[in-house]
């Protein structure tokens, strides 16, 4: 099988030897969404492709794939565009063509302006094109315990900010407002990923707490990531102005 556990990074996986930096379930779901909604041979753009694991899995599923990257880690025989995701970008920056599917997995939380990123991604799609977007689920049972103990989820604190640039924490309602403003309709949404524990005693202590929270509390407590399948609508992307603040 192309998917294998990454022995050098417990809890993470490989695809055909390439490290998967998001949750493996999110990658597998993205490929299923593509296969459900797109014709084979469609043009796909993998944004911030890491080492190219998702790109390779989409190629193997029968799609024409290009990617963007900020470094030289993608060692695949595909078009790879270097773009700054903190700045607005257009089709001219990614081959001067539109894409049937754009994938942006676990990247929106790393940028200075999430709303701008969504508008730029929308510009790469023709009307009816699909964006698969994922980001950490800060409503999860694990995140809520970390809110209580630390004041914020671990993934948005300390070295996760300075080393991994987790700087844009998006809760469901705020993210979905950005999605609407960018001109997308939500086709479906999912919660993926397993909670990770640093030790066996932590797992023994927290698992029953998480289970009880999922029964008793409202909100999206399951899954470590949110995944959206979004379709570009005919609506013109909208930027909120100061006059719209009460």
Image (cartoon, rainbow, N blue to C red):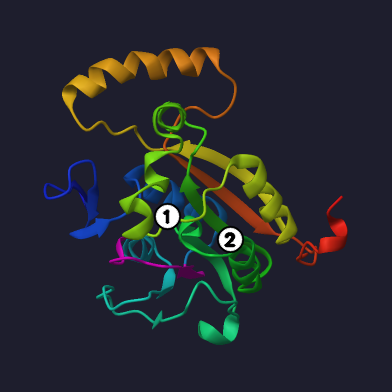
Mark 1 neighbour density, 10 Å: few (under 14) some (14–19) many (20 or more): many
Residue 215: x and y in percent read 50, 13
Q: Residue at x 71, y 49 (%)?
A: 177
The answer to whether 122 appears left or right of 53 in the picture is right
The mark total stands at: 2
Q: Which residue is more in the foreground, 198 or 47? A: 198
Element type where label 2 sits in the image: helix
Which picture quadrant has residue 218?
top right
Which label number is shown at residue 1?
A: none
Query: From the viewer's perspective, is residue 170 above or below residue 207?
Result: below
Q: CA distance from mark 1 to mark 2?
A: 12 Å
Mark 1 in CB contact with mark 2 (< 8 angstroms): no
Residue 33: x and y in percent read 50, 50
Residue 192: x and y in percent read 43, 38
Q: Which residues are magenta?
A: 41-53
The residue tagged 1 is 166
Query: From the viewer's perspective, is residue 25 above or below residue 103?
Result: above
Q: Main secondary structure of the magenta part?
A: loop
Q: Residue at x 45, y 68 (%)?
A: 47
The residue tagged 2 is 114
Query: From the viewer's perspective, is residue 149 above or below residue 174?
Result: above
Q: Residue at x 34, y 52 (%)?
A: 160
């Amino acid at each position: 099988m192309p998917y294998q556990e990454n022995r050098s990074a417990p809890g993470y996986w490989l695809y055909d030897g390439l490290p998967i930096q998001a949750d493996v379930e999110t990658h597998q779901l993205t490929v299923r969404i593509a296969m459900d909604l797109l014709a084979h041979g469609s043009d796909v753009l993998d944004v911030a492709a890491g080492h190219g694991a998702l790109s390779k899995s989409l190629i193997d599923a029968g799609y024409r794939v290009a990617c963007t990257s900020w470094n030289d880690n993608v060692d695949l025989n595909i078009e790879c565009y270097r773009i700054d995701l903190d700045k607005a970008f257009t089709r001219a920056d990614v081959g001067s063509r539109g894409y049937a599917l754009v994938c942006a997995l676990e990247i929106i939380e790393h940028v200075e302006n999430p709303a701008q990123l969504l508008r730029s991604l929308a510009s790469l799609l023709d009307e009816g094109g699909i964006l698969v977007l994922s980001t950490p689920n800060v409503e999860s049972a694990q995140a809520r315990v970390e809110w209580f103990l630390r004041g914020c989820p671990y993934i948005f604190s300390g070295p996760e900010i300075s080393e991994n640039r987790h700087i844009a924490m998006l809760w469901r309602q705020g993210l979905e407002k950005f999605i609407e403003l960018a001109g997308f309709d939500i086709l479906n949404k999912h919660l993926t990923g397993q909670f990770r524990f640093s030790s066996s005693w932590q797992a023994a202590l927290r698992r029953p707490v998480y289970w009880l929270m999922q029964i008793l509390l409202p909100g999206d407590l399951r899954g470590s990531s949110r995944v959206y399948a979004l379709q570009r609508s005919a609506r013109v992307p909208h930027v909120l102005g100061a006059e719209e603040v009460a």
